[in-house]
Image (cartoon, helix red, strand yellow):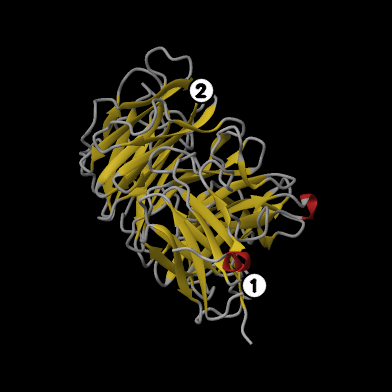
Amino acid sequence: MKFSLQTLILACMLLCFGKSANAQFSYDSVQTFFVCNAAGTQTSVSAFSDGNGGTYSYWIDKRNGLAGSAIYGQHLDSLGFPQWTANGKLLATATSKEIWNMTAVQWQSGTLIAWVQGGFGIGGDTIHCMYYDQAGVAQWSTPTVVANKQGQIIYVDGANLDIYTTNTNATITFSLVPSGGNTYFSFNKIDNTGNLSLPINSTSYTGGGYYYHSADDHHGGFFVAASTGGLGAHIYVGHFDAQGNSTISSPVDISTVAGGRGNDQWNIFCGSDTSAYVAWDNSSPGDVHLAKIKADGSLPYGSGGAKPVCTVPGYKALTYGTIANDTIYIIWADPRQGASNYKVYMQKLTTDGDPLWTTDGVLLSDLSNYSPYPKLAITGNEVVATYVSGSKFRAQQIHPDSTIGWTPNGIAMNTNNLPSTLDYVIVPSNDGSTTIIWKESGENICASRIRQNGTLTNISSPKITTAEIFPNPASDHFSILIKNSGNEKTVIRIFNSAGQVVSEQIDSEQGEHKFTVNSLKLPTGVYTVSVSGNNMNCVGRLTIVRQ
């Protein structure tokens, strides 16, 4: 269909990007996309999907110096366009205090954030919690105090600060340090109005150690793994049900076959059957192990508690595991074959602890690195692993049969602003793409988005779709002129000023045509219109007015 020149003059061009143009997410690993590069330090990243291809991310921000640390957040749409203020929206401020740790999780239709704050250089004295809607607006009149320094408590420790949610409440875990005693594990529950279920600082659990890691059991309760953290120190596990009651009379040693090393060389995760799994690399001879424990304290893998995952000589490190669809995936740093530093290996196992891939794991990268900081996430039937190797931040796709989907050693996401810790999050999207948000060594927050085919967002393509929107301002309807030169569907999304998707429609027609959208139900205001397909990204502003 052809349109007159007069009609096209009335059209307001959308900002359109073919894959050879620069959009928000960078298509070049040398060019870093910053979520936040404000002055000061940004750290402690939490992130999750918005359900529409975009992400919500949150972090501790020290741009205001001694005036107090703060928590900022950003909502990026699927194209990488910020829906909130550039460099982040201010959500909470600890006036004249430092925020030592924070965590944010998706809950109900918004975000629940908990943070530990206290004096500069002193440590935590209070844990606060606040619920925010999709626009980042606080929903309670004041933050709820979950724990604080009082009585015998001299320090509030946020090292194991976590939030586990149900439809009606959330459990917040943390540690408390008493005068003259060892750190112990504690928790409280909060409802959607900000009220606590338990008195402040009323729960305590020692669990055989004073370093703790916990995991949601997906049934309202949680598991806790504890250790003293020394070389060869054993790991003990306990469990609490949805009512906060301990279901294991005495913490169970799951590591009698081999103790751990350090206070962070193990992690715990749970399946759908209320069982927990603990993966760790031990102190001697440096193998990777996996243990399984049920909520009643029984050990399905036998009295030793664990099964070996990798026994190739060499001290492994940074073991990380997860579970999906009753399948376990474990990734670790590995110095085998005489590597001067670490390579990256991975294994897939059944819930019985039996390997499904090559014995001792599959090689993901043979480019050695002093500390690869490996992680992984499940994206549909595939696994996406991320790590630092060969002086680049890389990602690799692994198929169910252990073959790799992308270039050997992984595609380079970034070369100039690498993560220097495990302070990053992998966020899968329902379209098969993956967004990684991380704190880089220069103390900024960065992001990269990878398509399912292993290309960074906005890689060049010969197929380019252009679009125009008219009239603008609009009232009861508007139209988009689409020139689709490829055999693909086009998705039209409308976002309100809060970044919420208020309309989504699919256009399957090919070639040059007009697509009309009914806007009668849209209140007056300014909206963002996104038009996208496999090989195009277009975004622009639309104003709705009425007489």
Q: In which quarter of the image is the C terminus?
A: bottom right
Q: Mark 1 points at which residue?
A: 142
Q: What element carries label 1?
A: loop
Looking at the figure, which quarter contains the N terminus?
bottom left
Residue at mark 2? 390
Q: Residue type at mark 1: give it.
A: Thr
Q: How far apart are marks 1 and 2 (CA)?
A: 47 Å
Occupied quadrant, residue 463 = top left
| Nearer to us: label 1 or label 2 | 2
Type of the residue with mark 2: Gly
Q: Residue 235 appears at what percent x and percent y?
A: 38, 39
Q: From what the image shows, is residue 193 above or below residue 92?
A: below
Q: Is 118 rendered above or below residue 455?
A: below
Crowdedness of circle 1 by 10 Å Cα count: few (<14), some, many (20+)? Answer: few
Name the residue: 59% across, 74% down: 140
Query: Where on the picture, by quarter, is residue 402?
Result: top left
Q: In this view, does 259 lie to the left or right of 17?
A: left
Query: Which of 495/43 is in front?
Result: 495
Above or below: residue 369 compared with residue 277: above
Residue in front for this viewpoint, 530 or 318: 530
- Percent across and percent down for residue 215 are 39, 52
- Pinpoint residue 67: horizontal percent, then vertical percent: 79, 55
Q: Could you tell me if residue 359 is visible in this image?
A: yes
Provide residue 15's location: percent of width, then percent of height: 59, 55
Q: Can residue 131 be seen in this view?
A: no
Cβ atoms at labels 1 and 2 below 8 Å apart: no
Q: Earlier in the sequence, mark 1 or mark 2?
A: 1
